[in-house]
Image (cartoon, rainbow, N blue to C red):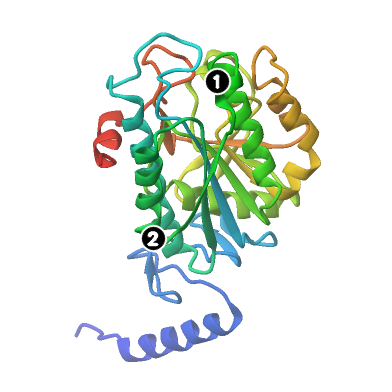
Amino acid sequence: MKEIKSTKKTGYIKRVLIKICRVFGYELIDHSTLDLPVSNKSYEDTISVPGNKSISIGLGETSITRKVEAVDIIVKTCTGIQLVSQNKNRVFEEDKSEYTFRTINSLVKSAKDLKKKFSKIKIKFTIIDVNSPDSDTNKILSIISNEGFKAELARVEDVNDFKDNMTTTMASIKKSFYAAQNCTDLIYFVEDDYIHKRESLAEMIFAYEKFSSIFQKEIFILSTDYPYLYKKMDNSSILIGEKTHWRTVNESLLTFMTSSKMIKKYFEKFVDMATNRSDPFEKNLHEIYEKEQCFSPIPSLSIHCTNINSVFGLSPNIDLKKLWEENKN
C-alpha cells in the first residue's frame, strides 16, 4: 500500500517558521516556486526593503546603513538650442522642445515609480532654465505639479551678455551647483535630453543605498551607459543592484547623482568646471572620480538623445524607439 504523507503537519511547521522569521527579520525562499512567504512576494517583485536591507537571490542580504531620505532632481533646460557645440540633428530629428518635454515626462513617471517603492522619500524638482519661452516653462512645471510633485523654476539671468551657447550652458551648470547647496540629501543633475526608463530613479536609489552602505562612503551614480566608455579597455568592477548590474567607471557627462556631502566636499572644483573651459569639459569631474567611486548601469537606465553618430549618445542594447514613444506628450 502506498504511504500517504501528512501535509497538515508540514503546513503547520511552515507557518510557525514564517512567523518566527518575521519576528527576527529573516526571509525565506520557496525553492519550488521562488516565492518569498515571509514578505508575501515573488522573486519577480522588488524584494529589498528600502532603508533597511538589500536582498539579492543567490547573494543574500546587505544591511543598509546609508538610508536615502530625499532626492532633489535638478533639470537644466533650454528649449531653443538644438546642440550646444554641434550643427547636427538629434536622433528622431525633432525640435529641441520635444526632447525637453519627453525628458520631463520620463522623469515624472520614474519619480512616481520611486515613490511607490520608497514611500517615505521626499522628491523635489528644480528647473534651471535658459531662455525658454514662458509657454514651455509653464508646460514643464505643469507636467510635474499635475502629478503631485513640488517644482521650482530658476532662470539664468542676463543671457544676452553671454558670448555663445557654451558660455550660456556653463552659466546654467554653475547655477545648478549653487542650487544644490540648499539640498539635504541626494541630488540628481539632469540635462534636458535624457529620456529615462520608468524604473530608473528607483534602481539608482536602491544602488546608492546598497553601495554606499557596503563601502561606507558617499558615491556617484549614473543613469546612462555611455557608448564612448566601450572604446577603451579600462578595468571595471561589476556589482549587483536591485534589478540591474552596475560597473565602476572613471568618466561621465554632466548627468549624474550624488549627495549634498559630495557637493560640499568638491564645491570649488564643480564651480571651476562651470567657469573655466577644459578639454574635456568634464575634466574636473573625472578627477573627482579618481578619488571617489562612480557606477554606471548595465544596460542603460536612460538614453542621451544626441546625434546618432556621437559616441557620447545612444546607449547600446536599448530599445531606443520604444523608450522615445513611451514618453511622448
**Quadrant, the C terminus:** top left
Q: Nearer the viewer, residue 3 or 179?
A: 179
* Amino acid residing under circle 1: Leu
Upstream in the sequence, badge 2 or badge 1? Answer: 2
Task: Give the residue at x 43% y 21%.
Answer: 81
Question: Pointer 2: residues within 10 angstroms few (<14), some, or many (20+)?
Answer: some
Residue type at the position of mark 2: Tyr
Residue 51 or 63: which is nearer the viewer? 51
Q: Which mark is residue 78?
A: none
Is any part of residue 90 visible from this angle? Answer: yes
Q: Residue furthest left?
A: 1
Which residue is at a point 55% across and 22% down the rendered structure image?
160
Between 19 and 321, the residue placed more toward the observer is 321
The reply to whether the C-beta atoms of the residues labelled 2 and 1 are less than 8 Å apart is no
**CA neighbours of label 1 inside 10 A, class few (<14), some (14 to 19), many (20+):** some
Residue assigned mark 2: 43
Image quarter where the N terminus lies is: bottom left
Check the image and report above or below for 121 versus 237: below
Residue 105 in the image: x percent, y percent?
A: 35, 45
Q: Residue at x 31, y 86 (%)?
A: 7
Q: How far from the left and from the top, in percent, is residue 64?
A: 65, 62
Q: Taking 68 as reference, is 35 left or right? A: left
Residue beneath label 1, please? 229
- Distance in Å between CA atoms under marks 2 and 1: 32 Å
- Residue 256 percent across, percent down from the top left: 58, 37
From the viewer's perspective, is residue 207 above or below residue 301?
Answer: below
Can see residue 47? no
Q: Which numbered disc, 2 or 1, marks the residue closer to the eye?
A: 1
Q: Which residue is outermost to the top?
A: 87
- Badge 2 marks a residue whose secondary structure is loop
